[in-house]
Amino acid sequence: MPKDKWFNTNISNYSMGLAGECGELVDIFKKVIHHGHKLDLDDIKKEMGDCLWYLAALATTLKIDLDEVASMNINKLIKRYPNGFSTSDSLKRVDTQAELFQNTGY
């Protein structure tokens, strides 16, 4: 299989697999919240594990370090919520406003 075909096939498979597994996780919570099912932490762990597997497979295919992704996300959230979460800071989204101006040259 040509390298670009292999790459595209993996990206497609892993991203769709991640979406599907995340959907299964959400479905568990839907059933608990809206259908009266009991919260089963073992089922949640299994679905989280499937989500992690697909996320790791995507990262490997794209040569992205998940530790770097986690650090970037923590730094983003610290900028967005310097004093912990607040609705006001959530609406302001100062981190995205700064990026907007950087990307437009203002």
Image (cartoon, rainbow, N blue to C red):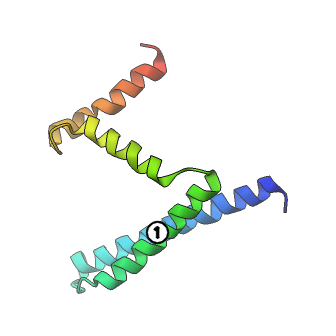
Please provide percent x and percent y for residue 22: 43, 68
- Which amino acid lies under the numbered mark 1 shown in the image of this protein? Cys
Q: Is residue 32 left or right of residue 6?
A: left
At 29% from the left and 80% from the top, the residue drawn is 31
Please provide percent x and percent y for residue 27: 36, 75
At 43% from the left and 21% from the top, the residue drawn is 102
Please provide percent x and percent y for residue 52: 46, 67
Read off the residue under disc 1.
51
Q: Is residue 12 above or below residue 76?
A: below
Residue 73 image-quadrant placement: top left
At 60% from the left and 58% from the top, the residue drawn is 60
At 76% from the left and 60% from the top, the residue drawn is 6
Secondary structure under tag 1 reads: helix
Toward the viewer: 85 or 27? 85
Q: Is residue 37 left or right of residue 64?
A: left
Q: Is residue 8 above or below residue 83?
A: below
